[in-house]
Amino acid sequence: MPLPNNNPMNNRPPRRPGQGRPGQGRPGQGRPGGPGMDRDRDEFKDRVLDMRRVTRVVAGGKRFRFRATVAIGDMKGKVGVGIGKGADVQQAIAKAKADAKKSMVVVELKDGRTIYHEVMAKYSAARVLLKPAKEGHGLKAGGAVRVVLNLAGVKDATAKCVSRTPNKLTNALATMEALRQIRSKKLVKTEADN
């Protein structure tokens, strides 16, 4: 003789086709991973510039976390750099992307391919020089500076890390500072007229 099944989960009514799980709403309507989630993935491209394991010494040993430096951009003049720390790599990258979206810079590009004028910027120990270039020149830059300019949509320019620091984070943030200093075509014309 089989024992009676007292589990309340087995006593619920059967689901209708297309009903989904209880508490989840209608399938495909605002659920995590649903159709609306790919919108910002398509809008911005991202690149991980740097990943470091950081250690905090606590009583009883060391606590390891990860620090990610991520650059995001739409290749049309919007770019941002963010930093995120997390217990694992994926969490750090997700936090860095969210931070990068908060620090977005809109760069007005000349003919949609280069910057308007030469600019030099400094952030911490990093110093970066950006120069415009003629069409077909290409993007001549290295390391983190190249990634940031590429995500901003700059196709023709020359860049140089004038400082000796190899730190990708400070080089990327110096590039962001340089892009903030670039003036629009209206300001360049008015200054040329004066």
Image: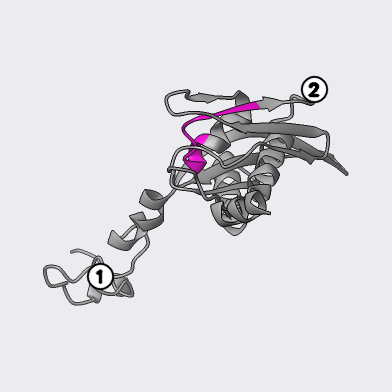
Taking the image as shown, residue 171 lies to the left or right of residue 187, namely right
Taking the image as shown, residue 189 lies to the left or right of residue 85, namely left
Taking the image as shown, residue 53 lies to the left or right of residue 21, namely right
Q: Which mark is residue 194?
A: none
Point out residue 159 in the picture as x, y percentages from the top left corner.
Answer: 63, 28
For mark 2, does the 10 Å Cα neighbourhood hold few (<14), some (14 to 19), or many (20 or more) residues?
Answer: few
Comparing marks 2 and 1, which lies closer to the viewer? 2
Please tell me in which quadrant of the rendered image residue 19 appears: bottom left
Point out residue 114 in the picture as x, y percentages from the top left corner.
Answer: 50, 37
Residue beneath disc 1: 10
Q: Which mark is residue 164?
A: 2
Judging depth in this view, the residue of 26 and 39 nearest the camera is: 39
Q: Which residues are magenta?
A: 150-159
Q: Say which amino acid is labelled 1.
A: Asn
Q: Residue at x 63, y 40 (%)?
A: 68
Q: Residue at x 77, y 33 (%)?
A: 127
